[in-house]
Amino acid sequence: MKVFIGGLVSAFLGIIGILMFFKDFLHLLAGALPLALLVGGAMAAYLGYDEVKDQINIPFLKKKGCGAPSESSTGSDDISKYKEELQKYKEEVEKLKAQLEQK
């Protein structure tokens, strides 16, 4: 309730401030708008560049070694190791659930 009342008071004071200093508010807005457009445009251009880079097959733009596993690292020994680790974590979760139920 306190936060709601504080928000209403802040909004009311903000409206009064904008009305009293409208000319200064417009100057601030006029200065902030080009900066916002510059930052937004740069971000959009970067995201567009990444999208175009992914669609076009240009060898020098592609990253080498993006972390894709090679065939030798996906052997059956790795799979069994992961299954054992998964089973260990499942057992640990069950133990923690039992401890929570006891409390």
Image (spheres, grey):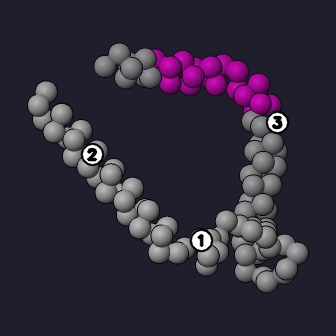
Q: At x 48% / y 70%, what residue is drawn?
A: 77
Between marks 1 and 3, how big is the CA–CA gap?
55 Å
Q: Which residue is mark 3?
A: 31
The residue type indicated by label 3 comes to Gly
The residue type indicated by label 1 comes to Ser
Q: In this rendering, which labeled residue sits more in front, label 1 or label 3?
A: 1
Q: Position of residue 14 (x, y in %)?
A: 57, 22
Disc marking residue 93 = 2
Q: Which residue is mark 1?
A: 73
Q: Counting residues from the N terminus, which is met first, the one under dot 2 or under dot 3?
A: 3
The residue type indicated by label 2 comes to Val
User: Residues in magenta?
Assistant: 9-28
Q: Looking at the picture, does residue 88 appear above or below residue 96?
A: below
Between marks 1 and 2, how big is the CA–CA gap?
28 Å
Q: Counting residues from the N terminus, which is met first, the one under dot 1 or under dot 3?
A: 3
Q: Nearer the viewer, residue 29 or 52?
A: 52
Q: Counting residues from the N terminus, which is met first, the one under dot 1 or under dot 2?
A: 1
Q: Looking at the picture, does residue 40 appear above or below residue 5?
A: below
Q: At x 41% / y 67%, what residue is drawn?
A: 80
Which is the main secondary structure of the residues drawn in magenta? helix
Q: Please identify the residue farthest to the front as the structure is shown.
A: 77
Q: At x 27% / y 45%, what residue is drawn?
A: 93
Q: Position of residue 26 (x, y in %)?
A: 75, 33
